[in-house]
Image (spheres, rainbow, N blue to C red):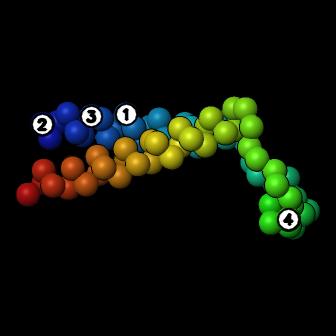
């Protein structure tokens, strides 16, 4: 069982890294950091398309990663 959890943890870790790297940046440099922050607070922009899908996949993979990490820690005992 421990080996299966370790293998799944490695696969989910690599998938999580790839999904995060595939996401587009939220700002374009320093001017985007200043303007983008106010736009997020004031404007009602929503992520659409592939960015929204990648965001949802990131959340799911992060939850699976946390659960598998807890399981791997449990099996060390």
Query: Tag 4, which secondary structure?
Result: helix
Counting residues from the N terminus, which is met first, the one under dot 2 or under dot 3?
2
Q: CA distance from mark 4 to mark 3?
A: 44 Å
Q: Which residue is mark 3?
A: 7
| Residue 21 shows in the view | no
Task: Identify which residue is drawn at 15% across, 55% down.
Answer: 74
x then y, percent, for residue 27 = 81, 54
* Residue 12 placement: quadrant: top left
Look at discs 2 and 3 and give the one toward the viewer.
2
Counting residues from the N terminus, which is met first, the one under dot 4 or under dot 3?
3
Q: CA distance from mark 2 to mark 1?
A: 16 Å
Please state which of residues 2 and 37 is positioned toward the viewer in this rendering: 37
Q: Quadrant of the N terminus?
A: top left
Counting residues from the N terminus, which is met first, the one under dot 4 or under dot 2?
2
* Residue 42 placement: quadrant: bottom right
Looking at the image, residue 65 sits to the left or right of residue 56; the answer is left
| Residue 59 shows in the view | yes
x then y, percent, for residue 4 = 20, 33
Question: Quick one: which residue is furthest to the left in this view?
Answer: 77
Q: Which residue is mark 4?
A: 42
Query: Tag 2, which secondary structure?
Result: loop
Q: Are marks 3 and 1 in contact (CB under 8 Å)?
A: yes
Q: Are marks 4 and 2 in contact (CB under 8 Å)?
A: no
Query: Tag 1, which secondary structure?
Result: helix
Q: Which residue is mark 2?
A: 1
Q: Which residue is mark 1?
A: 11
Q: CA distance from mark 2 to mark 3?
A: 10 Å
**Crowdedness of circle 1 by 10 Å Cα count: few (<14), some, many (20+)?**
few
x then y, percent, for residue 56 = 56, 41
Query: Tag 3, which secondary structure?
Result: helix
Q: How many marks?
A: 4
């Amino acid at each position: 069982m421990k080996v299966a959890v370790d293998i799944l943890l490695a696969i989910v870790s690599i998938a999580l890294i790839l999904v995060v790297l595939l996401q587009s940046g939220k700002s374009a440099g320093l001017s985007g950091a200043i303007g983008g922050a106010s736009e997020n607070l004031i404007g009602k922009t929503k992520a659409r398309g592939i960015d929204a899908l990648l965001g949802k996949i990131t959340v799911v993979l992060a939850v699976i990663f946390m659960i598998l990490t807890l399981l791997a820690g449990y099996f060390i005992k």
